[in-house]
Amino acid sequence: MRRRRSGGQTVAGTVRRLPVVGVMGSGTQAHVDKAEPLGRWLAGLGVHLLTGGGPGVMAAASRAFAETPGRAGWVIGIVPGEVTPQGYRPRAGYPNPWVEIPILTHLPLSGAQGMDPRSRNHINVLSATVVVALPGGSGTASEVGLALRYGRPVVAWLDRPEQIPDLPGDVPVVGSLEDVQRFVQEHLP
């Protein structure tokens, strides 16, 4: 029998996988009032944190998660990039310093093009067990739409629905960390 390792456990030949919680939000504004307490809480929950790997909400949640003592999960970032004649190049500012497992992609599209099949937003959503959306722009809106399309549980923690443009009406909007906690815990295996 193998020993327990951070991020999972092998017992009698089977691997226990930790759930993955995707936190989506602004790449320009950190919204630390939401991203940091959410990151700390998720670190104590025994899950992996998945973000788009960049600045803003992604960095704030990642930093809070990574700096929480005793956490079991890892910080995963789905990194946008491009292949050039000189080789692979991630987008400037990616991955942020707290990403422990960078998933490097050749997928540069996000923002308004986030629903395009060449967008990494599909990977962000499909890799998450549960999606939590914080204030953001068109990229966040596309991730919320993809979560609905792919049947992923998704909740938006906002002060007002306009903090995510064109937010679908069937996405639950909550106003507190406690509401997010309830939603996430109800949807984890």
Image: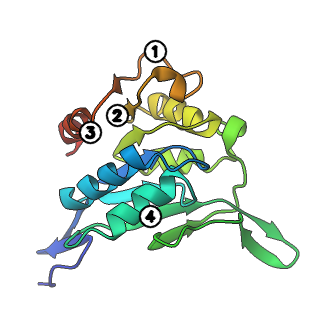
Outermost bottom residue: 2
- Mark 4 vs mark 1: which is more N-terminal? 4
Q: Count the marks: how many?
A: 4
Residue picked out by circle 4:
76
The reply, left or right, for residue 45 in relation to residue 173 is left
Query: What's the distance in space between the residues labelled 1 and 3, CA to CA?
Result: 20 Å
Q: Quadrant of the N terminus?
A: bottom left
Query: What's the distance in space between the residues labelled 3 and 2, CA to CA?
Result: 16 Å
Badge 4 element:
strand
What percent of the width, then of the height, locates residue 94?
A: 62, 66
- For the residues carrying marks 1 and 3, which lies nearer the camera in this image? 3
Residue picked out by circle 1:
169
Tell me what residue is drawn at x 58 percent, y 46 percent. Answer: 121
Outermost right residue: 85
- Kindly identify the amino acid type of the residue bearing the numbered disc 2: Pro
- For the residues carrying marks 1 and 2, which lies nearer the camera in this image? 1
The reply, left or right, for residue 156 in relation to residue 81 is left
Observer-nearest of 3 and 89: 89
Residue picked out by circle 2:
153
Residue picked out by circle 3:
177
- Mark 1 vs mark 3: which is more N-terminal? 1
- Mark 3 vs mark 4: which is more N-terminal? 4
What percent of the width, then of the height, locates residue 156?
A: 40, 31
**Residue 13 is at least partly visible in this image:** no
Badge 1 element:
loop
Q: Residues within 10 Å of mark 3 (few under 14, many from 20)?
A: some
